[in-house]
Amino acid sequence: MDTPYTADRSLYGKLRRRLARVVHARPAQLNLTRPLLTVSFDDAPSSAADTGAAILERHGARGTWFISAGLMGHDNHLGTMAGTDEIRALAAAGHEIACHTHNHIDCGKGSSPQITSDLDLNAAAFRREGFPEAVTFAYPYGDVSPQAKAILKERFTASRALHHGLITTGTDLNQAPAVGIEGADGEDVARTWLQRTAEQTAWLVLYTHDVRDTPSSWGCTPAVLDRLVTEAVEMGFDIVTFAEGARLAAPAAVKRAA
């Protein structure tokens, strides 16, 4: 993952992702009195494990870190990836440690055996390093296929994709929407979705990668993250981990997984 990779943007890739939305679904069931917000970090750069976590904790909140164990400690375009001790510290502080495959594979293109093998590798690494068992998942690159969903629905209570949207009753938790805090307009886009979420009393999942003063194109600055979390608190949001939101939205699925 040293060179940035993007998911298949061809017509076939777009159609495959669209088809995946109508199969192997787990409809959410929500009856909220306050809007929900989940703040998540993909791949787990050290800056997210350190600075990102500190920002959430200052607001009394906890987030979700989607970990590809095969990336731990490596350097790439997002900076240095978090190591074992940093991830253990996140878990000890009450943050969720979730699955992002082991080698950050494209689940839209991978075969069923490849996806299964890579998930098994990540689960084994979590056990070996003393991380909590992952109960939720995020698709690397946001790429999805029907065969991937068929595998993931049996392993996780919810799986997050990258298409924009809110989680309301009926939303598919096996391909849940999310909004990125990334790029030049990331703060404005996220703020717009915060406002929509508050108006609809829905659940919004935000994601980013690195959190530093000069972020990559897939990250944000500490100031941006702090402003968004501050605004969410002031707007009356409950800030929850992805797993906590899934427990509210699909209690039957969580009971089966347990």
Image: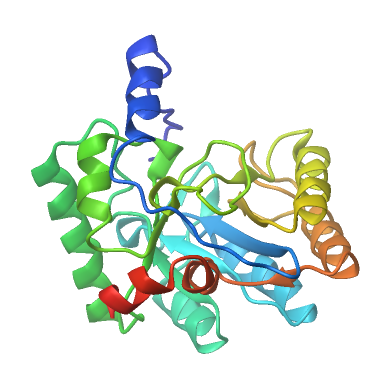
Answer above or below: position of 6 versus 161: above
Residue 148 x %, y %: 24, 43
Residue 151 x %, y %: 20, 51
Instruction: Specify whether 178 is left or right of 27.
Output: right
* Residue closest to the eye, 34 or 116: 34
Answer above or below: position of 164 versus 257: above
Type of colouring: rainbow
Residue 47 x %, y %: 62, 62
User: Which residue corresponds to the image point at 55% horizontal and 68% vertical from the top-left?
Assistant: 245
User: Which residue corresponds to the image point at 41% horizontal and 66% vertical from the top-left?
Assistant: 98
Residue that lies at the very extreme toward the bottom in this rendered image: 92
* Residue closest to the eye, 249 or 239: 249
Residue that lies at the very extreme toward the left in this rendered image: 113
Q: How many marks?
A: 0
Place residue 163 in its image quadrant: top right
Instruction: Specify whether 89 is left or right of 154.
Output: right
Answer above or below: position of 175 versus 42: above
User: Which residue corresponds to the image point at 61% horizontal and 37% vertical from the top-left?
Assistant: 164
User: Which residue corresponds to the image point at 14% horizontal and 36% vertical from the top-left?
Assistant: 111
Answer above or below: position of 214 versus 43: above
Residue 33 x %, y %: 74, 70
* Residue closest to the eye, 212 or 143: 143
- Quadrant (top left, top right, bottom left, bottom right) of the N terminus: top left
Instruction: Specify whether 139 is left or right of 226.
Output: left
Instruction: Specify whether 254 is left or right of 93.
Output: left
* Residue closest to the eye, 255 or 103: 255
Place residue 56 in its image quadrant: bottom right
- Quadrant (top left, top right, bottom left, bottom right) of the C terminus: bottom left
